[in-house]
Image (tube, grey):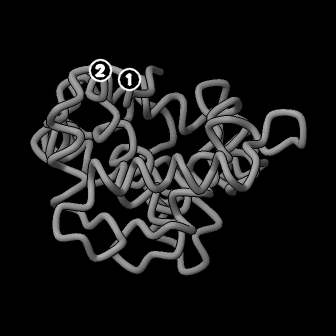
Amino acid sequence: MGGSSSQLSKELLNEYQDLTYLTKQEILIASQRFTDLLQKDRKSTDTTETGRVSKKTFLELPELKANPFKDRICYVFSTSENHDSMSFEDFLDMLSAFSDSATLEVKSYYAFRIYDFDGDGALSREDLEMLVNRLTGEEENSKLSKDEMRQLIDNILEESDIDKDGTINHSEFQHVISRSPDFVSSFKIIL
């Protein structure tokens, strides 16, 4: 198989469609975008199916460039040992999770992993502070004061921490997300 989208076999295209929330057309577009990234990464001899795009090149995608969680997105979806590159299947997994067709459960699962900065399976005060800082900006003029941050995190935990253990686990996070109709429509990347 070659590196262009037109050279994905019908069998592989059907398999990708069965395994994702993407249409065949979206998969073909993704394949071409991935091939373009490989060429930008100067790996034009790699094929879409076997090549890996560096994290640096991947994060330059216009759809991710301004996203405050772009490094976390790459980290969560990358299957490379150091989370420093993306395969085509990693790319498809990411696009599928951010697709309009993905379920609330899928979106909340990946959002939780993106926000769980230390990867311990719970959103702690430290995770929540990092999340808020990324959303509000980490520059001194946009950063919340220590008291404002403490109050905001206290409020978040008061609303979300059902078992009162000082953290938000995945089921608590999913419960909060289920009450937020805007979450599904805002958790997407369009190529």
42 or 145, which lies in front? 145
The image quarter containing residue 61 is: top right
Residue at 41% in and 48% down: 155
Residue at 26% in and 42% down: 107
Q: How crowded is mark 1: few (under 14 residues within 10 Å), some or many (20 or more)?
A: few
Residue type, mark 2 in image:
Asp
91 or 173, which lies in front? 173
Position above or below: 178 against 93: above
Give the image location of residue 118, x and y in percent. 52, 75
Can residue 12 be seen in this snapshot?
Answer: no
Residue type, mark 1 in image:
Ser
Give the image location of residue 92, x and y in percent. 36, 43
126 on left or right of 172: right
Position above or below: 181 against 53: above
Position above or below: 112 against 134: below
112 or 96, which lies in front? 112
Distance from the alpha carbon under mark 2 to that under mark 1: 6 Å
Residue 124 bears which disc, if any? none
Can residue 42 be seen in this snapshot?
Answer: yes
Give the image location of residue 6, x and y in percent. 39, 27
Which residue is disc 2 drawn over?
182
The image quarter containing residue 34 is: top right
Which residue is disc 1 drawn over?
186
Q: Is there a contact, CB below 8 Å, between mark 2 and mark 1? A: yes
90 on left or right of 99: right
Outermost residue, right side: 140
Position above or below: 10 against 43: above
Question: At numbered mark 1, what does the secondary structure look like: helix, strand or loop?
Answer: helix
Residue at 69% in and 29% down: 66
The image quarter containing residue 143 is: top right
